[in-house]
């Protein structure tokens, strides 16, 4: 098998663990065609990764999300070795990496297809920005202490006018992230749904909406056009303004994660979230 590996410069500063993992992969008779110490802002030369059977990230969930964003066009399966504190999306713990990589070389895994969101930001009927997100899309206030009013529509029907810290729209993969912290539900990562959750709304009700993945969600920033707020996708921020409209729907792109046969999403959820990995 052929592998490409990316390690987080903050978690593996000198690349010593990256070197250790590469040497172990080669000891199994497999080939490392590319390895790199990567910061979140670094670009990836996808031509150097093309031809890999598996991409492995060394870091936390942020590292996995970043590499997934940058390699989505290649359709190469990804798996993460957790060097962080929680690492819900990363499938392999550091102290188990040899056992799990051996399982990979023996092809004892299955593919988990993860849906993505597509978002278009419109300003005065002009396209300002578009993106794909594996985890979530967040519209939020920019200045602490301020609120932002957002009108939310689902398939053309107004759901509510939320005045608060903002709104999260997450994929099932992202349901265990910021969306869950904001009080929203947890979803099986392969479910055909999206989830919309208001963030600390200044109102008596604040329920989430579980939405079929064929739906379209539109968020209108109900503020003056000089009001500055923030649009965030998978941890990447873009400035937006009052009057902007964010249209969100299912992307035609998807990410492939490796999933081990004996891995159970709900057991992992309890261990990682409830027991905090203890």
Image: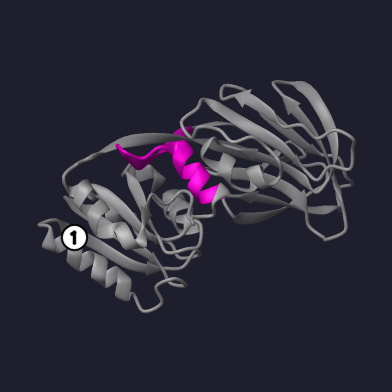
Direction from residue 233 to residue 55 in the image, left or right: left
Q: Indicate whether 258 appears above or below 52.
A: above
Q: Indicate whether 132 appears above or below 142.
A: above
| In the image, residue 2 lies in the stretch drawn in magenta | no
Find residue 45 and report its horizontal and vertical position in percent.
35, 59
Find residue 163 and report its horizontal and vertical position in percent.
87, 42
Residue in the picture at 37% in, 35% down: 112
Count of numbered badges drawn on the protein = 1
Instruction: Give the magenta-colored segment's residue range.
Output: 252-273
Q: Quadrant of residue 211?
A: top right
Whether residue 217 is visible: yes
Q: Residues within 10 Å of mark 1 (few under 14, many from 20)?
A: many
Direction from residue 100 to residue 251 in the image, left or right: right
Find residue 226 and report its horizontal and vertical position in percent.
86, 53
Residue in the picture at 38% in, 49% down: 91
Direction from residue 47 to residue 227 in the image, left or right: right
Q: Quadrant of residue 135?
A: top right
Query: Could you say whether the residue bearing mark 1 is in a helix, strand or loop?
Result: helix
Which one is in front, 172 or 161?
172
Which one is in front, 273 or 110?
273
Which one is in front, 275 or 203?
275
Q: Indicate whether 108 appears above or below 60.
A: above
Question: Which residue is tagged 1?
Answer: 25
| In the image, residue 263 lies in the stretch drawn in magenta | yes
Q: Residue furthest bottom?
A: 14
Direction from residue 10 to residue 74 in the image, left or right: left
Find residue 5 and report its horizontal and vertical position in percent.
30, 60
Whether residue 131 is visible: no
Which one is in front, 98 or 29?
98
Residue in the picture at 64% in, 43% down: 180
Q: Residue furthest left?
A: 29
């Amino acid at each position: 098998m052929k592998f490409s590996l990316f390690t987080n410069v903050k978690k593996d500063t000198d690349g010593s663990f990256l070197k250790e993992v590469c040497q172990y992969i080669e000891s199994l008779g497999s080939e490392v065609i590319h390895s790199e110490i990567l910061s979140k802002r670094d670009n990836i030369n996808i031509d150097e990764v093309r031809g890999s059977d598996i991409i492995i990230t060394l870091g936390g969930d942020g590292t996995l999300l970043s590499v997934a964003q940058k390699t989505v066009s290649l359709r190469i399966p990804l798996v993460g070795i957790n060097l962080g504190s929680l690492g819900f999306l990363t499938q392999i713990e550091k102290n188990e990496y040899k056992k799990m990589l051996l399982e990979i070389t023996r092809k004892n895994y299955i593919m988990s297809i993860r849906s993505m969101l597509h978002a278009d930001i419109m300003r005065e009927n002009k396209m300002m920005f578009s993106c794909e997100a594996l985890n979530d899309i967040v519209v939020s206030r920019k200045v602490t202490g301020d609120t932002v009013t957002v009108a939310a529509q689902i398939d053309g029907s107004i759901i509510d006018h939320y005045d608060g810290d903002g709104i999260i729209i997450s994929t099932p993969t992202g349901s265990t992230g910021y969306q869950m912290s904001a009080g929203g539900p947890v979803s099986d990562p392969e479910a055909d749904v999206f989830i919309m959750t208001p963030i600390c709304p200044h109102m008596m009700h604040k329920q989430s909406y579980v939405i079929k993945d064929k739906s379209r969600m539109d968020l209108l920033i109900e503020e003056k056009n000089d009001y500055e707020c923030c649009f965030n996708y998978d941890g990447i921020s873009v400035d937006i303004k009052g009057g902007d409209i964010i249209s969100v729907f299912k992307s035609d792109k998807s990410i492939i994660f490796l999933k081990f046969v004996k891995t159970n999403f709900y057991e992992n959820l309890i261990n990682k979230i409830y027991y905090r990995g203890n």
